[in-house]
Image: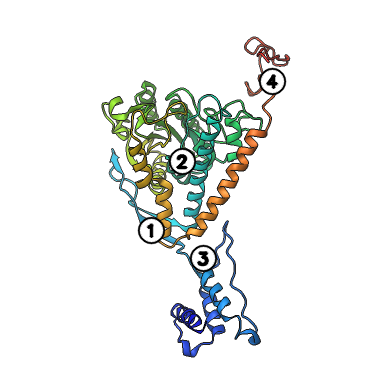
Amino acid sequence: MRNMFSLIANALCRITGRNVAEQTVSELLIDLSELVRVSSGETQIRRLPPEPPPELESEPIDNTAAQVVASRSFTDFTPQVTFSIKKCDVHGLEEGPPDTSVLTRDQGLGFYRCMQTIRRMELKADQLYKQKIIRGFCHLYDGQEACAAGIEAGIERTDHVITAYRAHGFTYTRGVSAKEILAELTGRKGGVAKGKGGSMHMYAPHFYGGNGIVGAQVPLGAGVALACQYQGNNQICVSLYGDGAANQGQLFETYNMAALWKLPCVFVCENNRYGMGTAVERAAASTDYYKRGDYIPGLRVDGMDVLCVREATKFAADHCRSGKGPILLELQTYRYHGHSMSDPGVSYRTREEIQEVRTKNDPISMLKERMLSNNMASTEEFKEIDIEIRKEVEEAAQFATSDPEPPLDDLCNCIYHNSPPLEVRGTHPWAKLVSVSSS
């Protein structure tokens, strides 16, 4: 016991810079407590115990010192680190985003929580689909979480986002809860679109879906950007599409109009390397998607690194707000699931390829390792966040399987914003609908 106390005392003295012989244990504890920072925010850290009364000093020395050491290791984190990130390839630009990124501890934990929630939510959707609780089309986003989290961090909440049918991640980053997203997937009243939109049609303030027609959201996004320009509100629109949609003719028409009118639009190609079941090399004569805008400048970005995506998005947003017109980002990313739940995802690529990306280039693991290796968080802290997220997603799934479906009478509601016409596809809006399905 005496040897253990001696080791702890020496450790405390190395931290405080005092001599063992010159300090009592109580004095060492007081000095150490002045060095320990108590973090604020979501993670609540236990404060140091008060100094024991003199008559108890001889007995609880070992326990108190151990508590102090444990408390310090849990709270004395590096608050901010500047990381080197992969340099972007540029097109039509004299310079691109910086090749360094400053990350604070709170930002890092926020990115981790966001991406891990999307990952767990998508894995739960996979499970519910295989149980035939989720029906129809369902395109999962796991593997691409850094794109949604990084873009959201690089724009303002008042900016606008429109994307394709792989929309669950952006629905979450735009402020919709996992509970509302999963309930929408299962077609329940508590869903974000009241159970009538499903996987491909989710909306939120300043978020316009989720669009099922390949590439159709790109001209719609340019229209939103035109409205921002017309209103002079200093807002921008981020219009996303996949590499599979990059060959659609309407994209090039939109590029031309956006360049002519200098629209504040950030076009983002989420290049996950496969359009449905076809590798990009088999579908496109040029896979340099960031150059496809011709006179529109472009950036090719590491889409698996949330910091790269954030810095590139900030750069692009500033470009648009300064009146220079549109810009195009190609985010090189990867989807772990197939194109949709009907696609096993291994007929056109190997399981080994998927596993290699998971092992070497996973966006969540890379962020976690960065923070751990720079003393920005502890393994225990990440475990606590994981437990909280699992609980949140499980509760969301429970709600998504128990909440009632929307009533049949609600089918004709919300088709028009106001002043509905007398006829809605052959029925009056006030008419009582009757199910003709066999019971």
Q: Which is nearer the N-term, disc 3 or disc 1? A: 3
Q: What is the quadrant of residue 358 in the picture?
A: top left
**Of 355 and 321, which appears nearest the observer?**
355
Q: Can you identify the residue that label 4 sits on? A: 408
Disc 2 crowd, CA 10 A, few/some/many (<14, 14-19, 20+): many
Left/right placement of residue 220 relative to residue 259 reads right
Q: Residues under labels 2 and 3: Cα distance?
A: 30 Å
Q: Which is nearer the N-term, disc 4 or disc 2? A: 2
Residue 30 place in picture, x, y as percent:
56, 80
Judging from the image, what secondary structure is the residue with disc 4 in? Answer: helix
- Does residue 350 appear anywhere in the picture? yes
Q: Can you identify the residue that label 3 sits on? A: 74
Q: Residues under labels 3 and 1: Cα distance?
A: 22 Å
Residue 37 place in picture, x, y as percent:
53, 69
Q: Can you identify the residue that label 1 sits on? A: 82
Q: How many marks?
A: 4
Q: List the single residue furthest toward the left.
A: 285
At label 2, the amino acid type is: Ala
**Of 265 and 99, which appears nearest the observer?**
99
Residue shown at 61%/74% (left/top)? 49
At label 1, the amino acid type is: Thr
Judging from the image, what secondary structure is the residue with disc 2 in? Answer: helix
At label 4, the amino acid type is: Leu
Residue 274 place in picture, x, y as percent:
35, 30
